[in-house]
Image (cartoon, grey):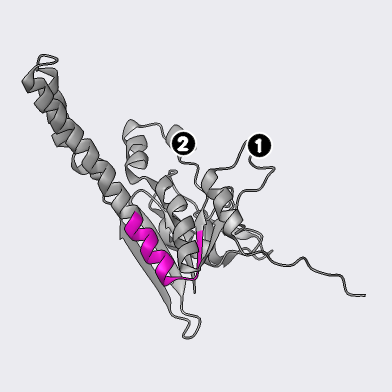
Amino acid sequence: MTAGVDLGVRTLATVATIDPTTGVETLTGYPNPAPLRVTLTARRRAGRELSRRIPGSRGWRHAKAKLVRLDRRCVHLRREAAHRLTTELAGAYGRIVIEDLDVAAMKQGMGRRSFRRAISDAAMGLVGPQLVYETARHGGNLIVADRWFTSSQIHHGCATPDGTPCRLIGKGRIDKHLVCPLTGEVVDRDINAARNLRDGPDHVAQLGPRPHRFPGQPQRWLVQAMASAPQHPAPTELL
């Protein structure tokens, strides 16, 4: 069974699958724990308490330890959420299609500081590397879609009369719901992206990056994914 996985900030992962026997579609959402947002008030309070202490004193060491514990808790919650997600996906589906997200570019493209903090808090960059060894351990196949495939902007199952895919319209870049200009249907951005990843053609969902798209060295987890992919024999010409 093929699963299209869309990673996001509002929802950590939206998974779209179709049962090949019955044809029933299943949509599953995994919530984003957002540990930094939950502990931000306590972290600010601990930071103010630390600033009022004399550096090197016993009270300063206690306040510093409190701040470190909050940071450590955020890191552990993010890792646990990523491990639970990848383990469940690799054990349940034999073919997983995910996006090649440039998290650093996403943070630079966001103007507001709260948006950049939310992207960092989601820790979407942990899912891809962990899926590499999880799918290899369970005997599955991991497909990384091309970075320039606009999965959230193309309306799934909708096209213009000339066959061109219909592009959804929204007021902003991070709108939750987009509108189809042909049918007027309001589409959920995450669900639409997961469907496009699941049903994407073979030339869109490729394993690893395209060389002409990435002038530098590819990410290490993409190299591992390409190395662990099954090798298919080259096609032979028929005489």
* Residue 167 occupies quadrant: bottom right
From the top left corner, tell me how far across and down residue 39 is, in percent: 18, 40
Q: Which residue in the protein does label 2 denote?
A: 104
Question: Circle 1: is it few (<14), some (14-19), or many (20+) Cα within 10 Å?
Answer: few
**Distance of mark 2 from mark 1, alpha carbons?**
16 Å
Q: Is residue 88 magenta?
A: yes
Q: Is residue 57 left or right of residue 108?
A: left
Considering the whole magenta stretch, tell me its main secondary structure.
helix
From the top left corner, tell me how far across and down residue 64 is, in percent: 15, 26
Q: State the quadrant of the C terminus.
A: bottom right
Q: Is residue 215 above or below residue 93?
A: above
Quick one: 231 or 238, which is closer to the camera?
231
From the top left corner, tell me how far across and down residue 143 is, in percent: 55, 60
| Span shown in magenta | 83-97
Quick one: 125 or 28, which is closer to the camera?
125
Q: Is residue 70 magenta?
A: no
Inspect this view and state whether residue 188 appears: no
Q: Is residue 69 above or below residue 126?
A: above
Q: Which residue in the protein does label 1 denote?
A: 215
- Say what amino acid the circle numbered 2 marks: Ala
Quick one: 69 or 204, which is closer to the camera?
69
Residue at x 49%, y 54% (from the top left corner): 152
Element assignment for label 1: loop
- Say what amino acid the circle numbered 1 marks: Pro
Number of numbered discs = 2
From the top left corner, tell me how far across and down residue 198 is, in percent: 52, 66
